[in-house]
Image (cartoon, coloured by chain):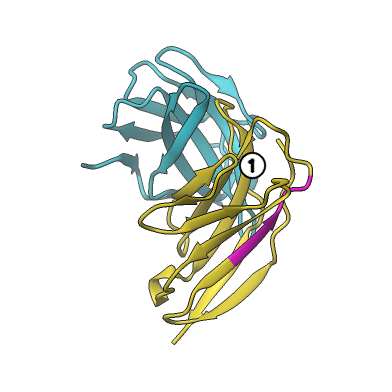
Chain colours: A cyan, B yellow
Amino acid sequence: NAGVTQTPKFRVLKTGQSMTLLCAQDMNHEYMYWYRQDPGMGLRLIHYSVGEGTTAKGEVPDGYNVSRLKKQNFLLGLESAAPSQTSVYFCASSNPRGQTNYGYTFGSGTRLTVV
Amino acid sequence: DAKTTQPTSMDCAEGRAANLPCNHSTISGNEYVYWYRQIHSQGPQYIIHGLKNNETNEMASLIITEDRKSSTLILPHATLRDTAVYYCIVRVGGANNLFFGTGTRLTVIP
């Protein structure tokens, strides 16, 4: 069972370039999330989705866009990369049951460097 | 979501129990306590969660005080592979975010 798969695992971009990070999950989870993690800090939520065709902003959404055209995929786009977006990006998914979200499943991360 | 306070770092001898404390004095009645860990830049891994009662699974035990203002994650027999950053999170069930603080860096010593 693959769980949550992120591609690519590493990428170096020049300032102003664009790219898309792909997250795919095979657990039929309803909710999906994109987080970023900077050195020595916890994870911060960028955007999330509570179902196919829906997206919402998290704590740090500026400079990013997302799409959830298929339930199993959640794409994170950087339209014009900036050095401040150098970070490790984690995708996660979860399946809410009633009033409780049981355990998020995280991908292994994408290490992005913007020069 | 309520704020949590955890020690910055802890050491534990291999084979001994690791007890990781977390204070969440402003927790409200509908907030759950979650624990995750992150091993060396991998994605965070869910460990356990609870509301009022103590919980145990194959990875750990979670002890929540009666007033729910603090909790302790117990790894009964720590191994070197348990070296990681451990995050204590409180959140309302169904909410759409996990707020990760800086966690506790647990180092298991041979």
Q: What predominant SS class does the magenta segment belong to? A: strand
Viewer-closest of B59 and B64: B64
**Which residue is at the far left?**
A1
Q: Is B16 located above or below residue A72 in the figure?
A: below
Q: In the image, what residue occupies the spot 51% across and 52% down? A: B36
Residue type beneath disc 1: Val
Quadrant hosting residue A19: top left
Viewer-closest of B14 and A13: B14
**Which residue is at the far right?**
B26
Image coordinates of residue A104 in percent, x first then y, are 44, 39
Query: Is residue A75 something that shows in the picture?
Result: yes
Q: Which residue is mark 1?
A: B90
Q: In the image, what residue occupies the spot 47% across and 21% down? A: A98
* Mark 1 belongs to chain: B
Q: Is A48 located above or below residue B17 in the figure?
A: above
Image coordinates of residue A90 in percent, x first then y, are 47, 44
Could you tell whether A27 is left or right of A106 in the image?
Answer: left
| Callout 1 crowding tier (Cα within 10 Å): few <14, some 14–19, many ≥20 | many
> Is B91 covered by the magenta stretch?
no
Span of residues in magenta = B20-25
Q: Quadrant of the C terminus of chain B?
A: bottom left
Q: Secondary structure at mark 1?
A: strand
Query: Is residue B44 something that shows in the picture?
Result: no
Q: Is B81 located above or below residue A93 in the figure?
A: below
Quadrant hosting residue B97: top right
Q: In the image, what residue occupies the spot 69% across and 60% down? A: B6
Q: How many marks?
A: 1
Q: Quadrant of the N terminus of chain B?
A: top right
Q: In the image, what residue occupies the spot 53% across and 71% down? A: B18
Viewer-closest of A69 and A92: A92
Image coordinates of residue B44 in percent, x first then y, are 47, 51
Could you tell whether A38 is left or right of A28 in the image?
Answer: right
